[in-house]
Image (cartoon, grey):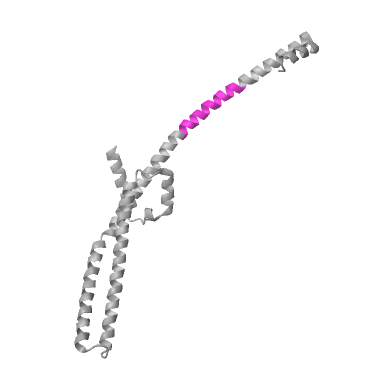
Amino acid sequence: MSNRKENSEETYRAALKGKKLPILTMDKKWYKLFDKLGRDGVAEYEERLNEVIRKQGKLTNQSKDIKRLKKKLMNEIVNMASDENELDKETREAKMAEHRALIEECNENLIAVEEEGRDLPFAIEELNLDLMISTMESCYEMMHSNEEQIQEIEAWVKEVRIELKKKLIEKQRMEQKNQEIYKYMHDIFGADVVDLFDLSQGEF
C-alpha cells in the first residue's frame, strides 16, 4: 500500500511539473474546503508551508528596510557633498566616510538576506505541491467513503421500497377482503342488522 501511494505521488508530481499552482494556504476557498473535510491529514504540510511563507515575508520586509536606509544614507552623502558651508571639511569627510561604511554594511546585509531567501520560492513550491497532493488524497478519500455509504443507502432504500411495495399490496388485499366480507354480510343479514352491529363494533 505504501509503495502504491509513493508511486501515485511521483505520478502526480511528474504530471504537475511546470504547472502554476495557487498557494493553497493563501486561498480562502481551500480553507472552506477543509471546513467540510477537517485538516487532520494536511495540518503538518499546512504549518510547514505557512512557516516558510512567513519567513519569506520577514526577509522581504528586511530587504525593503535595508534599501530604504541605504537610499537615505546616499541622499545624505549627496547633500553633504553639495553643501560645503554646512560643516567644516574635516567633519563633513568624517560623516561621509561613516555613511559610506553604513552603506557598505547595507550592501552586505542585502546580500545576506538575498542569500537566505534564495531557496525559499522553491521550498514554497515543493511544500505547496505536497499540500496539494495531500489535499487531493483527502478529498478523494472522503468522496470514496461517501460513495460507499451512498451505495449502502441506495441498497437499503431499494430493499425498503420492495418491502413497502409488499406491505402496500398486503394492505390492499386485506382492505379488499374486508370489503367483500362486509358486502356478504349486507347480502345475508341485511343493512339494518349490519348497521346495528356497526354501531357496536365501529365502522370498517
Residue ID at (55%, 23%): 163
Of residue 40 and residue 174, the one placed in the foreground of this image is 40
Dominant secondary-structure state across the stretch colored magenta:
helix
Where residue 191 sits, quadrant-wise, is top right
Any magenta on residue 151? yes
Where residue 114 sits, quadrant-wise, is bottom left
Question: Up-down: is 102 above or below 9?
Answer: below
Q: Is residue 31 left or right of residue 202?
A: left
Quarter of the image with the C terminus in it: top right
Residue ID at (33%, 56%): 18
Any magenta on residue 44? no
The picture places residue 39, in percent across and down from the top left corner, at: 37, 45
Question: Which residue of the protein is positioned furthest toward the top in this rendering?
Answer: 188
Of residue 88 and residue 78, the one placed in the foreground of this image is 88
The picture places residue 76, in percent across and down from the top left corner, at: 28, 81
Question: Up-down: is 82 above or below 161?
Answer: below
Q: Is residue 114 left or right of residue 46?
A: left
Of residue 146 and residue 107, the one placed in the foreground of this image is 107
The picture places residue 60, in percent across and down from the top left corner, at: 31, 65
Q: Which residues are magenta?
A: 150-168
Residue ID at (61%, 19%): 170
Question: Which residue of the protein is positioned furthest toward the bottom in this rendering?
Answer: 85
